[in-house]
């Protein structure tokens, strides 16, 4: 086996440097040390596979418009290395630029002296889509516009760094930087310790503490406001909320009352003190900004201006993202700070300025035209609307080594750096960030960014000191939307499993070897599947017709087939991503099997359903979130048990019907262990419908439903049962008084009707009901 140092030398010797790429791999000893460490873990192909596998296991991905599931995260095993001394210069530049942008925002929404002095053209300010005129003269209550910022950097020809973009409205990518570091920690072994790589955890702790310190209450409740599960970065947002301990909320979860913001939860309204928003500020409050917005929270700006809500970042911060602003920042820095920018931007000129024409004439070969305020007609018409465009210097892309083509090659990259306000009001820069790499089959991919130095780095964690933690067993706030998602995820998973069982039995997968359903039982199975809307009624019951019928019930996307049910469960699970494990999300997002063999595919799906049920049963803490997920499963399984008993177990059922009922109820083994004398209708019906000890039977589900509803929160403290609890108790009593000898289809039908009503009562009590902020005419505030 080749020693790691020789493998690393081979990689370096074969390194293909791109145009304009300095040969840092050969010159910098840190690169040699890093490659030796990586070579000890395997070849480049293996390292690439491991890096992407670890990123995928974390459940992180990015959604592309038009695609159902997020794409897996593409991670290079070769990190971008930056020396600590060089990084101190970047830190200083980021801190200076952030302080400058804070001052500019305060001026734009305050005295507007920059416009009065001619340092910023009024048209550039007013033309920026992020400038929110209604907030002029209304500064943030705590005086701070910025809490978290991001900047895209690129090396210039001299090796220095330049800012190519300021991301201030709702910066994205922090979760990707975090996950890149966590994944590389698993892949690279001792690389971080060997190079003394600075850690990320102190930055996240500082951001969390800084946001909490900005709130009025000592123990604030902080939410991460996501635009929803269809947002491209929703997986990253869920990951960050889980890591930081923030409450992941959507606009529909929130309501504003009396100049305060509340999240609608299963226990009533709970006050939110701060929101880290990840959407367009113009859509935040339809009463304050865009009245057409359907994804905002009416009244949220009133809470913000009253000082009862911290918004990170403050609405209007995006005014400085316009490309035209970059043309004036050097002069503004000189005026406000009395110094030059330590991290300059790409030289930019606004075409609305008469002097830009001379710049174009003199330097047209090395300039490119870009929109000044976001989208603009392209190709540009500089004669008709010059104010809509800027011209920028063309910067040669900086490159870094990546694993490709069987070795190390140079690829262009951009470095995204983050800064957050800490508890003292200063700025903390994340040591490293996120390198976005281009040219990989037309898709971008990423790399960890390691800041390394000569001194060992002390261990760090986001966990507080043990003596500073107040032990609690309350799992926290469960928003009504999240409870709704978990309840219906349970129902759809159970519904898909029940339909799959019917398809398998129809296909001949019975427990008794050689037992095939006779004509009468086959007709009942066909009716069971067709009435569920899974497939159209077959013209007959010939083998080929039944096979086509079963295939449609498995995969017809336009009906209530197994594939369609799975797709719906996947969409619902995506909305509850912050409360589900990565293993659960991988199973939900796994492609639907399309290989030949109906029973083979059905068996594969059955194992997937079993794995999902096992994860829920053995890995979810017994919180209210688990209770709603399990409640959904129990409601759906109870409906299925009652339906099956009514169809296959009533008077006149033959042995084949009863065998099918046991198969569909997964109760064959239980029956055989209990009854040695053969199959009997009353015994089968008792086991499937009335035996409270059978975990697949109706009575067992009803008992669990009642237990869940008794332990879930109630809104009043009068000790009286709520409607859903009363309904569950009556349903349990209905079945408890039944006897298998006299149980008929009418009684089972009544049980199913009551289950549907119970589901509606649960939804009415706990889930979102349009814009209604309260529950049962009463509300709890906390």
Image (cartoon, rainbow, N blue to C red):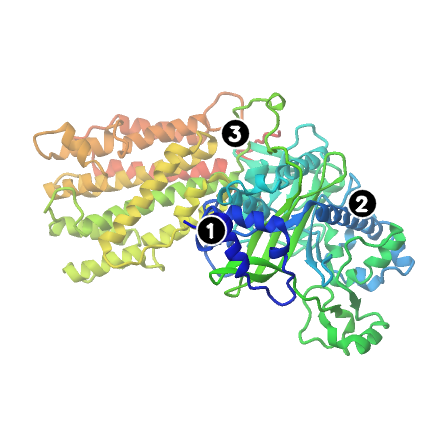
Q: List the single residue furthest toward the left.
A: 677
- What's the distance in space between the residues labelled 2 and 1, CA to CA? 50 Å
Where is the C terminus found, in terms of image quarters? top right
Q: Are marks 1 and 3 in contact (CB under 8 Å)?
A: no
- Compared across the picture, whether 156 is left or right of 188 comes to right
In this view of the protein, can residue 76 be seen by the observer? no
- Judged from the image, the secondary structure of the residue bearing numbered disc 1 is helix
Q: Which residue is mark 2?
A: 139
Residue under numbered circle 3: 475
Q: Residues within 10 Å of mark 1 (few under 14, many from 20)?
A: many
Q: Position of residue 542 (x, y in %)?
A: 14, 60
In this view, the residue in front, 707 or 453, is 453
Question: What residue is rendered at 19% in x and 41% in y?
Answer: 663
Q: Nearer the viewer, residue 39 or 545?
A: 39
The image position of residue 288, as x and y in percent, is: 72, 50
Q: Which residue is mark 1?
A: 47
CA gap between label 1 and label 3 equals 38 Å
Q: Looking at the picture, does residue 224 appear above or below residue 543? A: above
Q: CA distance from mark 2 to mark 3?
A: 36 Å
Name the element at disc 3: loop
- Residue at image position (56%, 44%) is 181
Mark closer to the chain start, 1 or 3 = 1
Residue mark closest to the camera, 2 vs 3: 3
* Relative horizontal placement of residue 387, taking residue 552 as reference (left or right): right
Q: Are marks 2 and 3 in contact (CB under 8 Å)?
A: no
- Tell how many labels: 3
Q: Earlier in the sequence, mark 2 or mark 1?
A: 1
Percent across and percent down for residue 120 are 85, 60
Relative to 499, say whether 764 is above or below: above
């Amino acid at each position: 086996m080749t020693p790691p140092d020789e493998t690393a030398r081979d990689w370096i010797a074969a390194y293909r440097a791109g145009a304009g790429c300095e040969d840092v791999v050969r010159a910098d000893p840190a690169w040699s040390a890093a490659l030796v460490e990586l070579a000890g873990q395997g070849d480049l192909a293996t390292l690439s596979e491991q890096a992407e596998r670890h990123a995928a296991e974390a459940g992180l991905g990015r959604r592309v418009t038009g695609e159902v599931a997020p794409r897996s995260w593409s991670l290079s095993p070769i990190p971008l290395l930056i020396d600590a001394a060089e990084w101190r210069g970047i830190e200083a530049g980021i801190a200076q630029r952030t302080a400058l942008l804070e001052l500019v925002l305060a001026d734009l929404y305050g005295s507007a002296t920059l416009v009065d002095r001619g340092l910023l053209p009024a048209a550039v300010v007013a033309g920026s889509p992020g400038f929110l005129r209604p907030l002029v003269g209304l500064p943030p209550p705590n005086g701070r516009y910025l809490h978290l910022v991001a900047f895209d950097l690129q090396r210039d020809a001299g090796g220095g760094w330049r800012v190519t973009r300021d991301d201030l409205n709702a910066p994205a990518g922090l979760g990707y930087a975090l996950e890149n570091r966590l994944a590389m920690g698993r892949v690279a072994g001792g690389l971080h310790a060997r190079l003394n790589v600075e850690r990320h955890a102190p930055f996240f702790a500082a951001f969390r503490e800084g946001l909490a310190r900005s709130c009025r209450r000592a123990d604030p409740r902080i939410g991460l406001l996501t635009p929803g599960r269809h947002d491209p970065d929703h997986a990253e947002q869920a990951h960050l909320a889980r890591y930081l301990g923030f409450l992941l909320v959507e606009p529909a979860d929130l309501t504003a009352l009396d100049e305060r913001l509340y999240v609608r939860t299963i226990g009533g309204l709970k006050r939110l003190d701060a929101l880290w928003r990840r959407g367009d500020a113009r859509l935040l409050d339809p009463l304050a900004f865009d009245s057409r917005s359907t994804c905002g929270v009416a009244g949220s700006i009133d809470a913000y201006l009253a000082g009862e809500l911290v918004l990170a970042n403050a609405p209007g911060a995006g005014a400085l993202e316009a490309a035209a602003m970059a043309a004036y920042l050097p002069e503004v820095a000189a005026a406000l700070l009395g110094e030059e920018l330590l991290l300059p931007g790409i030289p930019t000129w606004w075409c609305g300025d008469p002097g830009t024409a001379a710049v174009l004439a003199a330097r047209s070969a090395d300039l490119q035209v870009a929109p000044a305020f976001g989208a603009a007609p392209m190709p540009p018409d500089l004669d008709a609307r010059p104010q809509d465009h800027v011209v920028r210097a063309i910067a040669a892309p900086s490159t870094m080594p990546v694993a490709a083509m069987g070795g190390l090659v140079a690829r262009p990259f951009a470095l995204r750096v983050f800064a957050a306000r800490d508890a003292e009001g200063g700025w903390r820069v994340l040591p490293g960030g996120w390198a976005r790499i281009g040219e990989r089959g037309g898709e971008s991919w990423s790399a960890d960014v390691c800041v390394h130095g000569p001194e060992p780095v002390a261990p760090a964690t986001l966990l507080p000191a043990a003596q500073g933690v107040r032990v609690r067993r309350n799992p926290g706030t469960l928003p009504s939307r999240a409870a709704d998602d978990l309840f219906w995820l349970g129902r759809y998973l159970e519904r898909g499993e029940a339909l799959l069982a019917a398809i398998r039995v129809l296909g001949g997968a019975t427990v008794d070897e050689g037992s095939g359903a006779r004509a009468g039982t086959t007709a009942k199975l066909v009716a069971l599947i067709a009435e569920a809307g899974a497939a159209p009624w077959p013209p007959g019951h010939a083998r080929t017709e039944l096979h086509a019928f079963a295939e449609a019930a498995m995969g017809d996307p336009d009906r209530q087939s197994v594939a369609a049910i799975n797709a719906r469960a996947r969409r619902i699970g995506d909305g509850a991503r912050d409360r589900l494990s990565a293993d659960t999300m991988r199973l939900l997002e796994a492609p639907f099997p399309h290989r030949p063999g109906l029973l083979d595919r059905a068996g594969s799906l059955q194992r997937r359903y079993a794995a999902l049920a096992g994860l829920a049963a053995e890995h979810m803490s017994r919180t209210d979130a688990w209770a709603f997920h399990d409640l959904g499963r129990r409601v759906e399984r109870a409906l299925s048990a009652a339906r099956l008993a009514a169809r296959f177990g009533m008077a006149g059922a033959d042995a084949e019907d009863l065998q099918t009922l046991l198969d569909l109820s997964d109760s064959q083994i239980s029956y055989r262990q209990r009854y040695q004398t053969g199959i009997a209708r009353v015994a089968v019906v008792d086991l499937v419908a009335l035996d409270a000890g059978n975990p697949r039977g109706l009575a067992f589900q009803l008992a669990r439903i009642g237990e869940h509803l008794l332990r879930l929160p109630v809104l009043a403290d009068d000790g009286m049962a709520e409607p859903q609890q009363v309904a569950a108790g009556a349903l349990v009593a209905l079945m408890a008084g039944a006897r298998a000898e006299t149980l008929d289809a009418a009684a089972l039908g009544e049980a199913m009707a009551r289950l549907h009503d119970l589901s509606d009562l649960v939804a009415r009590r706990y889930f979102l009901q349009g814009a209604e902020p309260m529950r049962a005419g009463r509300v709890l505030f906390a």
